[in-house]
Image (spheres, rainbow, N blue to C red):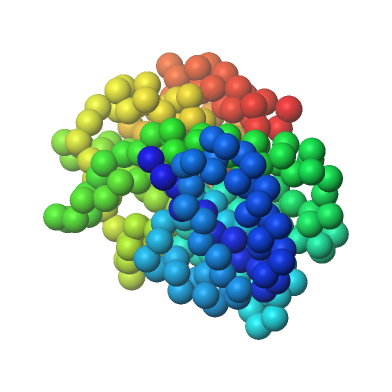
Amino acid sequence: MEFEIAICDDCNVDRAFLIRHIQKHKVMAERIHIHEYASGWELLEAMGNIAFAAIFLDIQMDGINGEETARAIRKTDTGLVLIFYTGYIGPSPFSFEVQPFRYMMKNMAEVQIAEYLEAIWSKILENFCKPMISAHIGKTQIMIKAEHILYIDKYKRGLRIHVIRQAYGTYGITACEDGNCPDVRFQGKMEDTYERLKRYGFGWPHDSYMVNCEYLCYCDAKEFRLTETEGTFQISRSKAKAFREQKDRFLCSKYL
């Protein structure tokens, strides 16, 4: 499989410099197709037709700058690997909004550039290997990335996926009048779905629903809350211990 990679920088020399280093990474070079853009507008327009696995983005550009471009990127794709390729020193508070994978300085030593590219390539492959759920909205079939799932609950004779609002644009989802996600359903059993997703940070606190621990904003022994939701979810006694252990494993893997 070939991965689509974008380099967005208004300096031709800097784009060429990065491409030369990417081409030195033989495995990466053989499996990617590089697209060059001289402005944020060009890149955003291209994203309507190309699903990029990774984007190298300069911050200081004429017209729409890298920060504005990054925000626009994340409104439509929360999963791609975003790398700031820049001479601008240091992350700013806005970085937490757009979650770049790396800050790659243009004056880095060649050895460090090679190390960064290796990490970026591993992240691209990791994203590709993450599971996707085949679901449908009405008669429209879609593939949902696990990282975009807020929680899954039992619904009638099947299961229903609640997608994070930030990813609606990725799947062409239009919010309901109350702002919530329309019914995204799939056939399957909760037990089988949990076995498939538990290694990716999902917990199963109740027979009726499983949750993506990435989006926990509060949790105690009996209940928890998720971002983008109102009210609390209950933790059943029979699943409390296993859920707590799964949640703690996820937090340790993320922050330690």
Could you say where residue 217 lies in the image, as x and y percent from the top left? 60, 44
Task: Give the residue at x 66% y 61%.
Answer: 16
Up-down relation of residue 118 to residue 92 (above or below): above
Could you say where residue 256 lies in the image, as x and y percent from the top left? 73, 27
Q: Is 235 in front, or is 108?
A: 108
Could you say where residue 108 lies in the image, as x and y percent from the top left? 82, 49
Task: Give the residue at x 49% y 41%.
Answer: 30
Q: Is 207 in front, or is 96?
A: 96
Up-down relation of residue 250 to residue 155 (above or below): above
Could you say where residue 83 lies in the image, as x and y percent from the top left? 65, 53
Q: Residue furthest bottom?
A: 63
Q: Quadrant of residue 27 in the image?
A: top right
Is any part of residue 83 visible from this angle? no
Task: Give the residue at x 51% y 56%.
Answer: 34
Up-down relation of residue 158 to residue 67 (above or below): above
User: Which quadrant is the N terminus positioned in?
Assistant: top left
Q: Is 40 in front, or is 180?
A: 40
Task: Give the residue at x 66% y 51%.
Answer: 20
In the image, taking residue 105 as reference, residue 206 lies left or right, namely left
Up-down relation of residue 67 to residue 20 (above or below): below
Is any part of residue 64 visible from this angle? yes
In the image, taking residue 103 as reference, residue 77 lies left or right, namely left
In the image, taking residue 255 as reference, residue 191 lies left or right, namely left
In the image, taking residue 161 as reference, residue 242 lies left or right, namely right
